[in-house]
Image: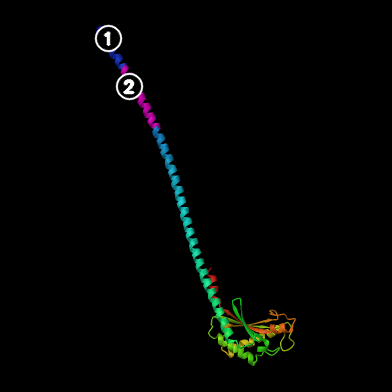
Amino acid sequence: MRKELLFIVLAGMTVAGSSCVAKKKYLEAENTISGLRKTNADLKEDISNLKERLYMMEDANNSAANELTSKDSLLYLKENALKSQEQQLRELQAMIDRQKRQTQELHRKMQNALGGFKSDELYVYTKNNKVYVSMSEKLLFPSGSAVVNKEGKEALGKIAQALKDNNDINITVEGHTDSIPIKIRFEDNWALSVARSNSIIRILVNDYQVVPEKLTAAGRAEFEPVADNATPEGRAKNRRTEIVLAPKLDELFNLMKTD
């Protein structure tokens, strides 16, 4: 009986000890699981933070790429605009050079055609890319008259002959007087200067078949002198008619309109 009792007591102690061990292991397992859960939560938070940073980096990269693309496009447009301007400048310079050569050739032709006249009767010069044929009053008109004399008509015939192959020029006939007011036939020096330019234009058109669309009549009266009106010599130089030959600038104006 005593042996059986002893066995029961030992068995109970063994069970109690086993129960304590199991409980301890259970608590340890729970602590481990709790730690793993916290670690897992921390990892999820880190992953979420990393994803957010990744998204931010992707947005920044996309913005930078878009900005770079925009800058590239702007640079491309600027380069094309610069190339276009350079091409227009080359074309403009080519036209200016061509007109200069045309003016020089026209000046040469006028000098050759009119070389037989004295310098105080007629002379040819160039100014502002235009050719001027300056003819004195004594070559063209009697004093105070707008009727062209024989020698004047011959000079105009030579000018018309030199111009016959030049279709791309404009011709302005400018009348000039001295500063002394006119007293007969005309109202004033304006009227005299315009009447003289009109007379020359009619001779160029009617006698020498110069195309009228090329021609313009202008009167400057005494307001564009080339010499001092205080002396007889100066007044004689101011009493003149100038035929102004200018290359047409239509092509140049059209190019400038495209800018």
Between 70 and 160, the residue placed more toward the observer is: 160
Residue name at image x 72 percent, y 84 percent: 233
Per the rendered image, the range of residues in magenta is 17-38
Does residue 251 show up? no
Residue tagged 1: 6
* Horizontal arrangement in the rendering, residue 208 relative to residue 240 (left or right): left
State the separation of the CA atoms marked 1 and 2: 24 Å
Give residue 110's quadrant in the image.
bottom right
Does residue 94 show up? yes
Task: Give percent across and percent down for residue 31.
Answer: 38, 26
Which secondary structure type mostly characterizes the magenta part of the structure? helix
User: Residue flagged by tag 1: what amino acid is it?
Assistant: Leu
* Horizontal arrangement in the rendering, residue 47 relative to residue 159 (left or right): left
Between 23 and 97, the residue placed more toward the observer is: 97
Residue name at image x 48 percent, y 63 percent: 80
User: Residue flagged by tag 2: what amino acid is it?
Assistant: Ala
Judge whether residue 20 is colored magenta: yes
In which quadrant will I find the N terminus? top left
Above or below, 203 against 90 in this view is below
Task: Give percent across and percent down for residue 214.
Answer: 57, 83
Colour pattern of the rendering: rainbow
Between 216 and 240, the residue placed more toward the observer is: 240
Which secondary structure, mark 1? helix
Above or below, 66 against 229 in this view is above
Above or below, 211 against 72 in this view is below
Residue tagged 2: 22
